[in-house]
Image: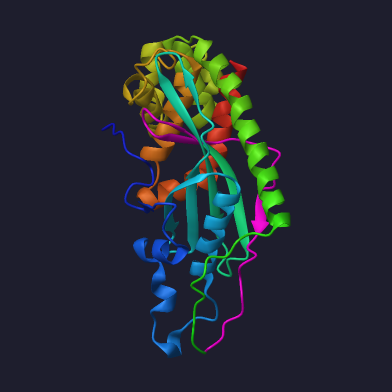
Amino acid sequence: MQFEKQKPWHGIGVDVDANLSSREMLYKAKLDWEVSKIPSQRPKSYANQETLRFFKGFFEAGEAHIETIGSLDASRILWGFARLNENFTLQGGDEVSGYILLASRNESREKIEVQFIIVRESCYNILQIASDAKPHVKNIFRRTFKPTFPFMNQKAQKFDDEMKKKVSEIVVQGRGAISAFADDAQILADKKVDEAAAWRFMFDLFQPTMTEDVAVVATKELAKIAENKTKLAMKAFAHAPGQELRSANMTAWGLLSAVTYTVDHHLGSNRDSRLRQAWFGPNAKLKKRALALALSL
């Protein structure tokens, strides 16, 4: 098992600058296929450009700094990632940054999903943070296709005051949730665990039917009966980037970080699959369960 310090979206998303227009972002991310097809194949919407325009407007209204845009699942999912400057640092210089994720998984691009994410900078683990903010908003820039020039509106569109207020409320709630999570993260970083407790944690997460059986098994025997995911997570607990920091070395925070690292970097057949499952699929739920288990230790 090789350990890498690389963003889970490396090679999938592209870095962008807030000064770029939504159309320039579209071309940089190679998502301009909607507007470059021959007329007979032209789709009945401008969904990609409209969605990136919405992302840009949302991030600007929320005072979030756009960093990356990309697509998943053969461009079915369009996403944008922006830094919130809502950060915290645990013992040993363990830096954690807050982000907001916007994603469209509907081909009509009508609904935009909103997630608040933390990224552990030492290894780029990602974890969704629960909040009271609205989980989705309507893409207000969608419009009907017209087969006459100009095909696309090149002017930047701005949110009106009502929409700006909605965005501000969502982002404020998300920032608050990340700030509150910092307290939980500190509790986990202060909570020491031994190797046997770490094995039981991983069994409870990945092999819950085995938990009662392993409770009385000697630590050396646990590795023999562990399934692959459990073994991967335990290796990450000991050797993944950032695990040497005081906040993570033999702590509950280290257990959670080992799980998120394993999910983000090693589960799934490829990078696209891993990111989809970590953000929207079963592995997002797995991370949520890992957090609950760590807090219950």
* Residue 248 quadrant: top left
Q: Is residue 264 left or right of residue 61?
A: left
Q: Is residue 124 left or right of residue 170?
A: left
* Magenta stretch, main secondary structure class: loop
- In the rendered image, the quadrant that contains the N terminus is top left
In the rendered image, the vertical position of residue 103 relative to residue 226, given as above or below: below
- In the rendered image, the quadrant that contains the C terminus is top right
The residue at the point 50 percent across, 81 percent down is: 43
Q: Nearer the viewer, residue 266 or 217?
A: 266
Residue 219 image point, x, y percent: 40, 12
| Magenta stretch holds residue 80 | no
Q: Is residue 177 left or right of residue 267?
A: right
Q: How many numbered callouts?
A: 0
* Residue 185 quadrant: top right
Magenta-highlighted residues? 118-147
Residue 231 image point, x, y percent: 37, 27
Q: Nearer the viewer, residue 101 or 271?
A: 101
Q: Nearer the viewer, residue 27 or 61?
A: 61
| Magenta stretch holds residue 123 | yes
The residue at the point 37 percent across, 33 percent down is: 228
In the rendered image, the vertical position of residue 15 relative to residue 75, given as above or below: above
Residue 160 seen in the figure: yes
Q: How is the image coloured?
A: rainbow
Residue 53 image point, x, y percent: 53, 63
Residue 93 image point, x, y percent: 40, 18
Q: Is residue 118 left or right of residue 233?
A: right
Residue farthest right in this picture: 162
The residue at the point 46 percent across, 63 percent down is: 22
The residue at the point 48 percent across, 10 percent down is: 193
